[in-house]
Amino acid sequence: MASSRNHNFIFMPISFLMIIATIPLTSAGLLPFSAKHVVIINKLVTRATLIVHCKNKGEDKGVISLGPGDSFDFRFRVNLRKTTVYTCSFAWPGNTATFDIFRADRDDNPKSKVGVCSECIWSIYEPAPCRDRRDGGQPNCFQWDGFP
């Protein structure tokens, strides 16, 4: 009888751990240090070259030149306090703009209106940066920072 109890004692925690392992908690924004992949695509209607410069407090991704349809991507992990922000400046002929391409409070928060993204795909248009949806629905477009 004692060996039967020991078997159940070991089986239950292992079953629980197997169930927990199948739930993608980090991609749902529920655990700290969730892995993120940001992709920025030049979709300027004018087909101009887009100059992109992204950085956060501790990391500068450098200045990248994107031709029409070209993309640039980078990966990182959200910090423990979930305050990670990557800000990008964008320039194309006659225009400059900035935008927080990743904000943990917006992009890694299940309660935000746009939801969590583990792969955050951004299409950059003249009027607005738009985060594409994985389900193919209408993208979520935002105003450029500092624009009325």
Image (cartoon, rainbow, N blue to C red):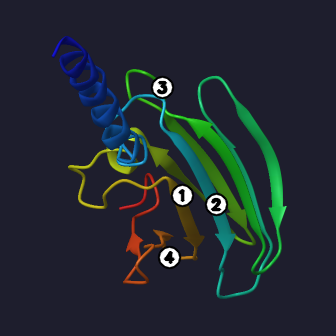
Viewer-side residue, 44 vs 114: 114
Q: Which residue is most to the top?
A: 2
Mark 3 and mark 2: Cα distance apart in space: 19 Å
Q: Which numbered disc flags the more N-terminal residue, 4 or 3? A: 3
Say if mark 2 contacts mark 4, CB within 8 Å: no
Across and down, in percent, residue 1 comes to 15, 16
- The residue at the point 39 percent across, 65 percent down is 142
**Mark 1 = which residue?**
119
Say if mark 1 contacts mark 3, CB within 8 Å: no
**Mark 4 = which residue?**
127
Mark 4 and mark 1: Cα distance apart in space: 23 Å
Secondary structure beneath dot 3 equals: loop
Hey, what amino acid is under mark 4?
A: Pro
Quarter of the image with the C terminus is: bottom left
Q: Which numbered disc flags the more N-terminal residue, 2 or 4? A: 2
Across and down, in percent, residue 30 comes to 31, 38
Mark 2 and mark 4: Cα distance apart in space: 19 Å
Across and down, in percent, residue 90 comes to 66, 58
Across and down, in percent, residue 133 comes to 43, 73
Say if mark 4 contacts mark 1, CB within 8 Å: no
